[in-house]
Image (cartoon, helix red, strand yellow):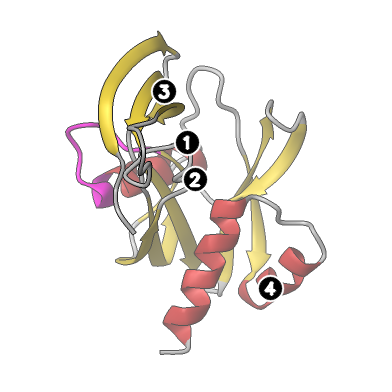
Amino acid sequence: MKKWKIEDKILLKNLKIFDLYQYKLVSPYSIKEKKSFDFFVFNSVDWINVLPITKSGEVVFVEQYRPGTDSITLELPGGMANKNEEPIESAKRELVEETGFSMGSWSKLGVVHPNPAILNNECHTFLALDVEEVSSPQNAGSEYTQIKFIKLEDLDKMVIEGKITHSLVINAIYWYNLYKDS
């Protein structure tokens, strides 16, 4: 495979959490003539996902409203990384903000590209073991989360039953299953 050549990038719109760009790309596979194609790319900071497990073996989840699906979703704590913050620091901050939990021992489970067709960012997933409640959630702006505890052994079943549908949460569970089996 060959990479395509970026001929031009045009900022179309700043959308607060994304910048929408139009890319003009030239295909390396156009034999007779150089053909360019327009693609649309969302430029975003990296995202964070945390799988926090209490000493009693429960995973700290959050429920929150998501306008994209107009539904209440069950998710792991997470969010956007700050530009001048290491991913682990963003993860620790997001965990406290959304759940009020902190402490524990931390390790990185993995990194994925959430949707490389239209997004240019990464999602970093962290495991936090033996977390403890240190405060109430510190939601701000339009964010409102409610904490829900799920037994670790119930996670796979909840994915199969469609109770957990967020792809990045399912990814974190997958990473954890690889981690615990290694």
- Nearest to the eye among marks 2 and 4: give it: 2
Question: What is the three-letter code of the residue carrying label 4?
Answer: Asp
Q: Is residue 177 above or below residue 29?
A: below
Question: Image quarter for residue 1?
Answer: bottom left
In the rendered image, residue 122, in percent from the top left (x then y), is placed at 36, 47
Query: Which is more N-terminal, label 3 or label 1?
Result: 3
Quadrant showing the C terminus: bottom left
Q: CA distance from mark 1 to mark 3?
A: 11 Å
- Nearest to the eye among marks 3 and 4: give it: 3
Please tell me which residue lies in front, 19 or 12. Answer: 12
In the rendered image, which residue does mark 3 sit on? Answer: 18
As drawn, the label of residue 115 is: 2
As drawn, the label of residue 156 is: 4
Question: What is the three-letter code of the residue carrying label 2?
Answer: Asn
Please tell me which residue lies in front, 164 or 23. Answer: 23
Query: Which is more N-terminal, label 1 or label 4?
Result: 1
Q: CA distance from mark 3 to mark 2?
A: 14 Å
Q: Which residues are magenta?
A: 80-89
- Nearest to the eye among marks 1 and 3: give it: 1
Q: Secondary structure at mark 2?
A: loop
In the rendered image, which residue does mark 1 sit on? Answer: 118
Q: Is residue 18 above or below residue 65?
A: above
Relative to 122, is 139 on the left or the right? right
Question: What is the three-letter code of the residue carrying label 3?
Answer: Phe
Query: Which is more N-terminal, label 2 or label 3?
Result: 3
Q: CA distance from mark 2 to mark 4?
A: 23 Å
- From where the camera sits, is residue 134 visible? no
In the rendered image, residue 119, in percent from the top left (x then y), is placed at 43, 37
In the rendered image, residue 2, in percent from the top left (x then y), is placed at 30, 54
Q: Secondary structure at mark 4?
A: helix
Q: Residue furthest right?
A: 161
For label 3, the crowd category at 10 Å Cα-Cα, with few meaning under 14, some 14 to 19 and many 20 or more, is: some
